[in-house]
Image: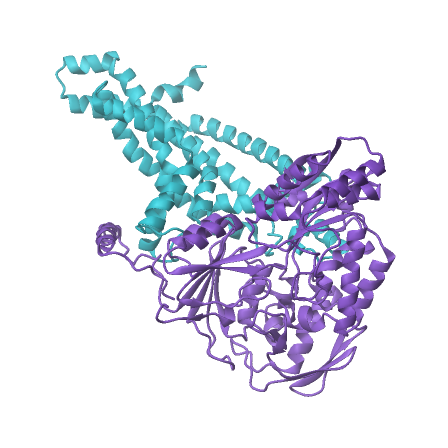
Chain colours: A cyan, B purple
Amino acid sequence: MIRFITRRGLLALLILFLAVTLLFGMIHMMPGDPASVILGPKASPELKAELNRRMGLDLPLPVQLGRFYGDLAQGDLGLDVFTNRPVADIVREQLPFTLALVLAAIGGAALIGIPLGCFSAIRRNSLLDRVTAVLSVSFIAIPTFVVALYLLLWLAVKWRWFPAIGAGESGDLGDQLWHLVLPAIALGLGWVGYIARMVRASMLEVMEENHIRTARAFGLPERSIILHYALRIAVLPTVTILGLGIGSMLSGALFAEIVFSRPGIGKLLFEAVMTRNYPVVMGSVVVTTGFFVLSTLVADIINAALDPRLRDSGRAS
Amino acid sequence: MSARTPISPRRINRRDFLRGSAAAGMALAGGWAAPGWTIERNILHIRNYVDLTALDPPFSVSGGEGIVSQAIYRNLLCFKPDGTWETELDSAEFFERVDDTHYAFRLKPGLLFTNDFGEMTADDVKFSLERIVDPAMNAPNAPDLATLSHVEVHDRYSGTIVLDAPYAALTTVGLAGATGAILSRQAVMSVGGRFGVQPPCCSGPYRFIDWQSQRKTILERNLQYQGPTAAFDQIHVYAMTDDKASEMAFEAGQLDCATISVESTGPFSKNPPPNSYVDIYPSSRNYWLGMNQTHPKLQDLRVRQAIQYGIDAEAVVEAAWFGLAETSTGPIPKGMTGHRDQALVPPRGDPDTARKLLRESGVALPLRLRLDVDTNTVVVTAVQVIQWSLKKIGIEVDIYTQDNSTFLTIGQESAGDQWQDVQLFFQSFIGLADPYYSLVWFTSQQLGIWNWERFSNEEFDRLNKQALATNNLAERDRMYRRMQDLMEQSGCYRFVTNGIMPQAIRNTVVPVFRPDGYAMLQHFSPITSPA
């Protein structure tokens, strides 16, 4: 298992390096003048040039990249060019909002999607199965921002059951949870359908396997067979998908954060890109990419822990 | 400030039920609080279109920051809360122009800075103004006090502002604007000589309490303020870059006042959210179609003039601003010195004249031109109407939209050679309290910086200097009118509109806005019983 984790960990670092390097290049090749945005129209060309020098934008791209990695190795993500605050502080402020949103969304989706998929598989071709299938595909098909807008229109604007904007008052857990409900539903709804379909398909496959038939032959209760023998295996692909889901939701959270005016890393990244605030863009990219890679790694490790064949596959090869 | 909508008992029951259910859940989770979207009494909740990046006056470049600055700081002078650009005394009890380069002032005694930084003195005025133009500060707002030499301190409260050269915008842009805020020398030096979004002291009717990145800024009534008591206990200024999100927040009752998008103004006006109304304020923004006169396709004056006459500005305003704005006569908006009553090119244009000019120029039709624009929905609509207008006279326009940061570079020489490829572009610049700020971008000095039309005219440059150096309003008026004539005669500009600033306002609030539609938070007040 240690060898497996080491191997996957090194691979994760390589992926992180390649992804961040690629993104660094892409972001810096975008046309745009951060100095004009930051300093406003009144700033003289000399002042703008000075700011570009301070940001290192006058250097060749490989040198900028080298400096970026050098600083990163020391845990320094640079300074926000607008506020002169350390980017690490800014990201640290915003990250909890996005993590809370993503975990609430994916957690809620898993809590609903797994039992739903399981139940659909057990009651295959029943009315519930058909209704679940239609709903699942609908949930998957509707884009996050559309869900967000309608939730906002109905539940916040029309009926005023939930707040429309913000993340709640600092230090007030109840208020923060209350503000989390709509964005989490908007972000997680598609995943309910996705997880339900995936669990259903896996369950149907597992239920046909020999060990399930054997268990039934031994007269084990059906509930026990489903929960202890079938679902445990059927949920494996879902764990992998959940890992990927957390990663992609970190960037997908942007829509929910904008529609609900929530602070968060997605909104931070979006606004930083729009204003070419390169240090904040890169700081956010490093963190979101890092989380994506980390969540995938954790999913792999959980999979390996649940299924010995996976952790032994490397050794066998 | 309470801005809740009267609601039916049925809704109360449903909401109460949900709140109760949620409360039970939250209590189990270990934390309970009243839901936070309920608007508390005597707190003003207002939208700001940007998040703060600096409240240090020399570095505060956005109008959104100015909204907050003017509520927490005092200047020598301030704008009257009557919708004009006229100024009145603020922290000064006396202010007088001695001559074109000397302005004497005397502070009101007993004005206090918060955080125990003591009384405001003439030395604080000297410190605050001189640091703006100090070359070592590299302050982007230094041009606001362009010709400031120094401030002479005579005694604890009085002094003289000394300029190197006459500067007509000193009182409006330099002293009454956000740049001219007076800070405590001791307070600023205690934080190293400059600061970001955490001001070390305040002196206005409100004091700064907290800034939550991407969320809101909280101001609180400054009990040490020597003027009329601030009307609200607190003001919560929400950073909301997205118009639609702020409109929904207003509809949901979470905001008392919000700038709304142009496209929502009509629906909001006809069917306003409960207990609210929409007011349309003028804007000082100048929207125009620019033409790069050095581009081979546009070097012929007759072609540029044909484009001017080919564009139906009224149709553009009708489609993009839903007829809520007026066509403009130039960069200087109504109510400001130098505003022209009418432009040289009629608002509807004149397609026959345009066709005639094109014929005379001998240009091969259809003439295909590129038009660059940013992604703002209003201006994208505007350029589509321009495209339609020009098609009628034989000019095919290809529209290229790009995000604002990219668009800002297309005519800048510092960003490479692409400025040479610029043909047509639809641009907008914001104005300030003095007409010079609406025209300074078109001088020869700005070639390749903000002057993307490559318009260069000696008379224009000369008038720009002269108008800024005289305090004679009639003369300034004449000069600025002439400058706009010159711009239009060059064929480089087709002025479209000055835009609007639509505001959705709760009936429980009495708002006050500047002539350019920016909120004057310090003058907002509540109405205890809704009208």
Indicate left or right for B333 with B454 as reference. left
Closest to the observer, A229 or B303: B303
Q: Hey, which residue is sitting farthest front in the picture? A: B352
Indicate left or right for A233 with B205 as reference. left
Closest to the observer, B63 or A216: B63
x%, y% of residue B83? 57, 69
Residue B446 is at least partly visible in this image: no
Residue A116 is at least partly visible in this image: yes
- Which residue corresponds to the image point at 57% horizontal and 45% vertical from the top-left? B319
- Which residue corresponds to the image point at 16% horizontal and 15% vertical from the top-left? A216
Tell me if residue A158 comes above or below residue A1 in the rendering.
Answer: below
Q: Hey, which residue is sitting farthest right in the picture? A: B458
> In the figure, residue A172 lies in which quadrant?
bottom left
> In the figure, residue B415 lies in which quadrant?
top right
x%, y% of residue B507? 40, 64
Q: Tell me how many marks there are.
A: 0
- Which residue corresponds to the image point at 55% horizontal and 61% vertical from the top-left? B281
Indicate left or right for B526 with B377 as reference. left
Tell me if residue B149 comes above or below residue A256 in the rendering.
Answer: below
- Which residue corresponds to the image point at 54% horizontal and 43% vertical from the top-left? A270
x%, y% of residue B16? 23, 54
